[in-house]
Image (tube, rainbow, N blue to C red):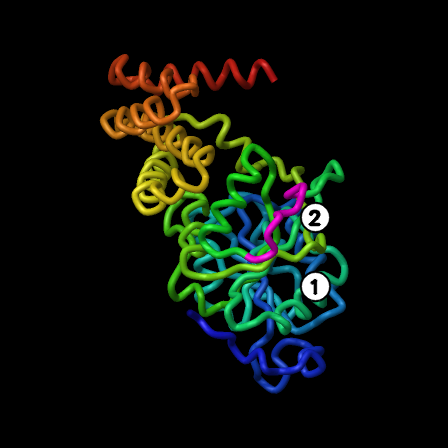
Amino acid sequence: MVQSSNLERTSQFRSGAAGELGRSPLFSVVVPAYNRERVVTRCLASVLGQDFGDFEIIAVDDGSSDGTLACLRAQGDSRLRVIAHGENRGVGPARNSAIAVARGDWVIPLDSDDELVPGALARIRDCALGAPATVHALWFPCRMDDGSLSPEPLPRKPQWDYEGYLGFLEETRGRWRDMLRCVRRPCFAEVGYPANRMLEDKFHLDFARRFRSRVHPEVLRLYHQDAGNQLVDHLRSLDPGRDRAFLRDRASGFAALLAEHGQALARTAPGVHGDYLQLAATSALLAGRRVAALGYAARLAVRYPRRLRGWLLLAAGLAGPRPSLWLQRLARRRRASR
């Protein structure tokens, strides 16, 4: 297990600004940004305005085509460092670039369209300094734009191992489960975010298999949906021609996830396991991997025969070499019905 990094320092000592006497800060706040010119300043202001100053921000412009990079460079605050990707590589690679140069004892990933609430870092500091060496991540719920909480209700177990995290996934299936995380930086030497455009599902499972997490009840993050280029909207309108690289990465990512965590998910979180089989089959079909898609669809139909989508995906895979066209039409009908 990764041990605590210099957490013997007292909270009184940890009240100053980052960089004092050349020492590392307590927190590295990691902010990836892609075409977020309109909202990234709001995110940064929520961090820079905290009443606890022992932090650094590492913002990564992930190949934006708007003025995001100029907004980042115009901040003029020594606590902010900016990294620029020459091309858009995805949120996982952007976070990895920031973490590679982070100096903080703990890493706090924060989306560029979200905010920290006032006093958030002071509260995380108290939790971090009070965490035993066996706890490697702290989780906090967030408040959505409509005032609801994510997750709601809070997890029943305040501390997770691997089985506990799988139980959390099953408990929150079909609901928002976005939370603010604070992770001991040495953990990333063993577990990293995806190196491609795959989302962070497998990262969290890999992390939970190696490290323990603790959930705190305080709401410390405001989750916004006003950025205009939300990933959830992109996922609803995937196009096999335009999004070929993204679909290949998703197909490979879900294949690896099921290969490494499928048995544990089927045993402890069967509903989530079925969801991942469905995602793997759909991604493989859209990526042109028909044989793999048929395998996932068959497993979904046999293990969860009441799921209509499994049978539909199986039929789509058997229908011919271009099942992605059928999936596109189905997605368009779903969007039109909302």
Q: Which mark is residue 222?
A: 2
Q: Quadrant of the C terminus?
A: top right
- Residue type indicated by callout 1: Leu
Tally of marks: 2
Q: Nearer the viewer, residue 301 or 246?
A: 301
Q: Quadrant of residue 278?
A: top left
Looking at the rendering, the stretch of residues picked out in magenta corresponds to 150-159
Depth check: give the residue in front, 214 or 280. Answer: 214
Residue 297, quarter of picture = top left
Q: Are marks 1 and 2 in contact (CB under 8 Å)?
A: no
Q: CA distance from mark 1 to mark 2?
A: 15 Å
Does residue 270 appear in the picture of this structure?
yes
Give the residue at x 68% y 70%.
Answer: 126
Q: Secondary structure at mark 1?
A: helix
In the rendering, at what x and y percent does residue 229 appear? Answer: 57, 36
- Residue 260 or 324: which is nearer the viewer? 260
- Residue at screen point 76% across, 39% down: 147
Residue corresponding to mark 1: 48
State which tag comes first along the sequence, 1 or 2. 1
Image quadrant for the N terminus? bottom left
Main secondary structure of the magenta stretch: loop
Crowding near the residue tagged with mark 1, few <14, some 14–19, many ≥20 C-alpha atoms within 10 Å: some
Q: Secondary structure at mark 2?
A: strand
Q: Is residue 290 left or right of residue 122?
A: left
Q: Identify which amino acid the numbered label 2 is placed on.
A: Leu
State left or right for residue 303 relative to residue 19.
left
Q: Position of residue 72 (x, y in %)?
A: 60, 57
From the top left corner, tell me how far across and down residue 159 is, in percent: 57, 58
